[in-house]
Image (cartoon, rainbow, N blue to C red):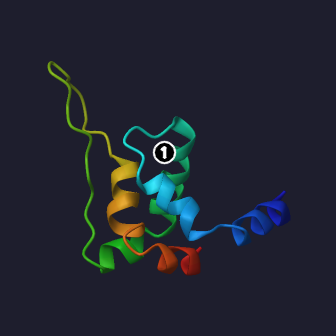
Amino acid sequence: MLDETLEKVKELKKEHLNEIRGFSSPSAAVVTVCAGLVILFWDWIMQNGGEVIYEKPQPGQTGPKQENWFEMCRKFLMKDLMGLIKMI
């Protein structure tokens, strides 16, 4: 399974990431993959001026803040798509 995944990653193109970057409302699967990328490259993000981005609270919402994984991925990893492909 890991070998298959690595082969699929090699097929990743800038156009694929550009399409994802343009999503206004990504699917749960996209958010999950973005969360994985942010976690994987957390140290790099923080060393390059990154910060945690939180979801905007809904009216009446209580409880802990929720990280916005998609926005963190888009802002800190997807600003340089070719750089992201090389890191992956």
Location of residue 36 in the rendering, given as x and y in whole percent from the top left corner? 53, 56
The spot of residue 84 in percent (x, y) is: 50, 74
Q: Quadrant of residue 48?
A: bottom left
Most foreground residue, 63 or 55: 55
What residue is at 51 percent from the left and 37 percent from the top? Answer: 27
Q: Residue furthest left?
A: 59
Residue 86 location, quadrant:
bottom right
* Secondary structure state at the residue bearing disc 1: helix
Q: Which residue sits at x=55%, y=51%?
A: 33
Amino acid marked by disc 1: Val
Where does the N terminus fall, quadrant-wise?
bottom right
Residue 11 x/y as whole percent? 72, 68
Q: Residue at x 58, y 60 (%)?
A: 16
The residue that label 1 is drawn on is 31
Q: Is residue 41 above or below residue 66?
A: below
At x 36% / y 72%, what residue is drawn? 45
